[in-house]
Amino acid sequence: MRNTLAAPWRYLLLNCVLWFGIFLLTRFLLLITHLDEVGGNYVSIFFDGAIYDLSFLVYAALPLGLYLSLCPNALWRTRAHRWLLGASLIASLFVMLFVAVAEWLFWDEFGVRFNFIAVDYLIYSKEVLDNIRESYPLPTLLSAIAVVALVLALMLRKPLSQVLDGPLASGRQRLLGITLLAVLGGMNGLLVDQQFPRGEGGNAYQRELASNGPYQFFAAFRNNELDYSQFYASIGASDIGAQMHQELAEPNASFQGTQPEDIRRHISANGQPRRLNVILVTIESFSAKYLGSNGDPRNLTPNLDALRRESLYFNNFYATGTRTDRGLEAITLAIPPTPGRSIVKRIGRESGYASLGQQLAAKGYDAVFVYGGRGYFDNMNAFFSGNGYRIVDQSSVDESDISFKNAWGMADEDLYRQTLKLADADYARQKPFFLQLMTTSNHRPYTYPDGRIDIPSGEGREGAVKYTDHAIAQFLAQAKGKPWFDNTLFVFVADHTAGSAGVEDLPVNNYQIPLWIYAPKLIAPREEAKLASQIDLAPTLLGLLNFDYTSTFFGRDLLKDDTLPPRVLIGNYQHLGLFDGNDLAILSPRGGMRVHEDALGNSRESRATQDNPLIRRAIAYYQSAAYGFSEGLLAWKPNQSGMAVNP
């Protein structure tokens, strides 16, 4: 630092240098622990990373720079102010070290820098803080960070003293400093965003390492909803309509919409309706790879492997997203993952859709969403209560009925016990029931009641998976003694997989989940290899019940014989994909279009245009879904008696 630089700017520069060093160290440590996945290109990682680091530092420096510019010279020289600046330096070191540790733990869980998930974790702070306290030695971590911050501060006593003793700032220097910060902030906003300079495509680990965690956090907070037509490739409305008619042209479907993008259609049943009960269990974070029948050697799922042999099991089934709210959105509304937040969490626009619950409630069912946690999390209560369900969550259950709970909710066995009570009550009043469950036990901190399985509680994901398997077996054993059992469809499906990160933006393998449909007196056991998506579950269930209904679903009845082209829709909050069983089309912000050939094998990425048939299929699904959402084309339309309008 030159002696001609005023003391306030030297202090600001010292903070920025320390922060930049912590960012650099974080990136280096993440890199050396993931060398196999990154596979080279280290210079680009650190060069692009430096741009993001400096970009964040420009934003972070603005408030401090403004204060330093306005600080009177008389105040600057006081002992109290020197102590304040020293304490501020220690506090900033603690914060940045804390962020570095948080990034490390976040990467360990999700394989990426901070993103939408981190934003959600900030919003739902109670559950997240409880989860952190139960998962990590928080007092030890915070104490260690504080010690390191203090040690660094002691090492910096002499440089800090030299900085504070520097020349005072003149009025001209203050004005120049404020102007420079404003110009840098404005240029930063125009030139740097989530895609520049890191780009899109290629090795996803390289792009994530080149990012800056705090920058990505605030960018995700700002871009919580992306307008499809503004950010993604589009095609004409008539082309959209023609393509979607091809995609959804089931033999028993007749389109009713007056707009090309409107997929509303009447579904005609092929036989007499069957008023079967339905219990749909959505299992937290359950990857298909955990099943012993899929090759896992740890014997974590003996009961689910046995259930597979007794069920209609879909062995080529994929989640649409990487979060619980995405799974619930896909299962309930049968819609592809629109960019930004899921519909479940779009507060003020999360209700009024032609959901699976609305369809069954209109047929006289008691449609209930049963959640092991508190339903305000992820806006679940508002979403389900606004779309045809009544709510039973942890807050609805007497404490005496809860044998065990952790940060996320009651143990699965307690959730199933409440489900049995609900089913018994509906059976007693001769009302068919649709109970849609969401479990919580297969989630960090991976704790569950003692003595249930041979893996101690809190030891990790393996124990949580095995407890999930145990609880489902116990639930079915109890259900078999109920008078309603023979007339009930039991559906078990995951909300998403346990890990979605990979070398590519949308690693298809990491979206595969299991689906069981179990009804021993009603459905013959078999394996179904048809390529299938979560958005296909709702129309398949309504097909099993032989119901006529008006559909706004983007999914298909998987049990119908058809010649429709195979596809699954997968995505995260930015990248949107369509996989046809061989190749994967990806749509990205700023009109990005790519195709991965042989996506499950030796994937080869290339740029694409709208002329590519797979790209056009992807655009048709996502553009029509976004348009249908924004224009109210997916709304539930009951008639005066409360039943759905079926033309």
Image (cartoon, helix red, strand yellow):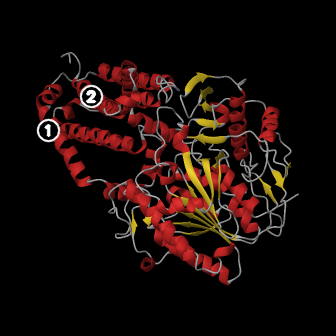
Q: Quadrant of residue 328?
A: bottom right
> Is residue 223 among the parts visible in the rendering?
yes
Q: Quadrant of residue 488?
A: bottom right
- Look at the image and tell me in which quarter the C terminus lies: bottom right
Q: Position of residue 621 (x, y in %)?
A: 71, 39
Q: Quadrant of residue 646?
A: bottom right
On screen, residue 439 versus residue 611, left or right, reads left
- Look at the image and tell me in which quarter the N terminus lies: top left
Most extreme residue toward the bottom is: 428
Which residue, given by chain and number where applicable, does mark 1 sit on?
Answer: 151
Which residue, given by chain and number where applicable, does mark 2 sit on?
Answer: 21
Most extreme residue toward the right is: 647
Q: Is residue 412 above or below residue 597?
A: below
| Residue in the image at 44% along x and 67% along y | 411
Q: Residues within 10 Å of mark 2 (few under 14, many from 20)?
A: few
Q: Is residue 529 above or below residue 402?
A: above
- State the mark number for residue 52: none
Q: Is residue 261 above or below residue 540?
A: above
Residue type at mark 2? Answer: Gly
Viewer-nearest residue: 310 or 238: 310
Residue type at mark 1? Answer: Val
| Residue in the image at 43% along x and 22% along y | 183
On screen, residue 584 versus residue 171, left or right, reads right
Structural distance between the alpha carbons of marks 2 and 1: 16 Å
| Residue in the image at 76% along x and 59% along y | 543
